Image: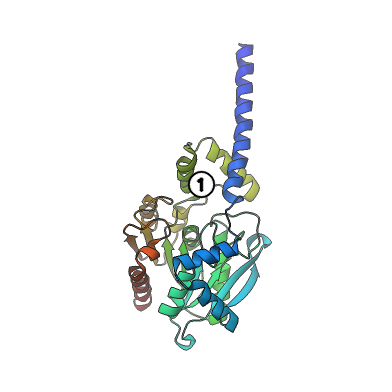
Amino acid sequence: MKTLLKIFTLAIAVFSLNSCFVGKFMCNYVLVDMPDGQNIERTRYKADSLLAGSTAWYDALHEKGTLKDTFIVGYGGAKIHACYVPAANPGKANGTAIVVHGFGDNHFVFLYLVRMYRDDFNYNVLFPDLQYHGYSEGDHTTMGWYDRFDVAQWVKVAHGIWGDDFMVVHGVSMGAATTMMMSGDEQPEYLRAYVEDCGYSSIWNQLKFNLKQSFHLPPFPVLTSASIVCKNRYGFSFKEASSMDQLAKCDRPMLFIHGDADDFVEFSHLQQVYDAKVNGYKEKWVAEGAVHANSFQSHPQEYKQHVKAFLDKVKKENL
């Protein structure tokens, strides 16, 4: 019996030690070993691949001084960066948009949305680099959970620049999760609407799928251990970082967008997050045949029409 007890104790110790090592590896793999988030040249190329001429458009406005850079101190003390540009016709601006990029990207990648808001909708636009991305500081990503505090700061910065009483936050992928996560926090009255495009329902649910997809592994013990490491190291667990829990507290209008061919953030997340928002106005649009973060490229005119119609409705009916 004593021998069996020793063997059992040793087995538990070995299992715990291995889980700890695996948890640290997984936590680093997800939050630290991020691909190319600060590689501006790669993402300049990507911006043009998503909408031709984007970097030339950006560079021309930047050289004229119309498009500007700014920095603030973000959550945890990191210096964070954003660009901002006034509406094409500043005297008749229809509002202000905050455009939030995805995982491993930066402010360049979603210039197609910046151009949509500025040139097509005549909105002022501010578009930040989340922490550990682009020109912003940081040594890890929080996949939206703490980024929501920084985006909330940018909302106030943008209001200080333009003074609009109609603002929208529009995020894609991790930026969409950030958008949903911030929607459950108290925000100023002039932040009137949200648009989320292919965001995940929680960090846990997303990583659970990615773990199975990439490594063919169940969530226990790898993801469980990684979540514990994340909690100890960064102050949050993967399960508490939930878009759904935050949406349950959101009462402002939101448009949910997702491509039905998305095989990275599964299409099923759309219904999960849509159902989680139980208060206030909401719409959803399914982009047929669109893969992850590709709804605009698959259906550019429909995308613009759905977003504009949603915002016009929110403004006209004071939803």
Q: The C terminus lies in which quarter of the figure?
A: bottom left
Q: Residue at x 46, y 75 (%)?
A: 115
Return the residue nearer the eye: 280 or 291.
Answer: 291
| Label 1, residues with CA under 10 Å away: few <14, some 14-19, many ≥20 | some
Residue under label 1:
239
Asked whether residue 228 is in view, the answer is: no
Q: Is residue 47 left or right of residue 263?
A: right
Q: Please provide percent x and percent y for residue 32.
A: 61, 50
Rendered position, 222 above or below 45 = above
Q: Secondary structure at mark 1?
A: loop
Return the residue nearer the eye: 60 or 280.
Answer: 60
Q: Is residue 258 left or right of residue 168?
A: left
Q: The N terminus lies in which quarter of the figure?
A: top right
Rendered position, 5 above or below 201 = above
Q: Residue at x 53, y 47 (%)?
A: 238
Q: Residue at x 59, y 81 (%)?
A: 63
Q: Quadrant of residue 254?
A: bottom left
Q: Please provide percent x and percent y for residue 16.
A: 61, 31
Rendered position, 68 above or below 282 = below
Q: Amino acid at mark 1?
A: Lys
Q: Please provide percent x and percent y for residue 176.
A: 46, 60
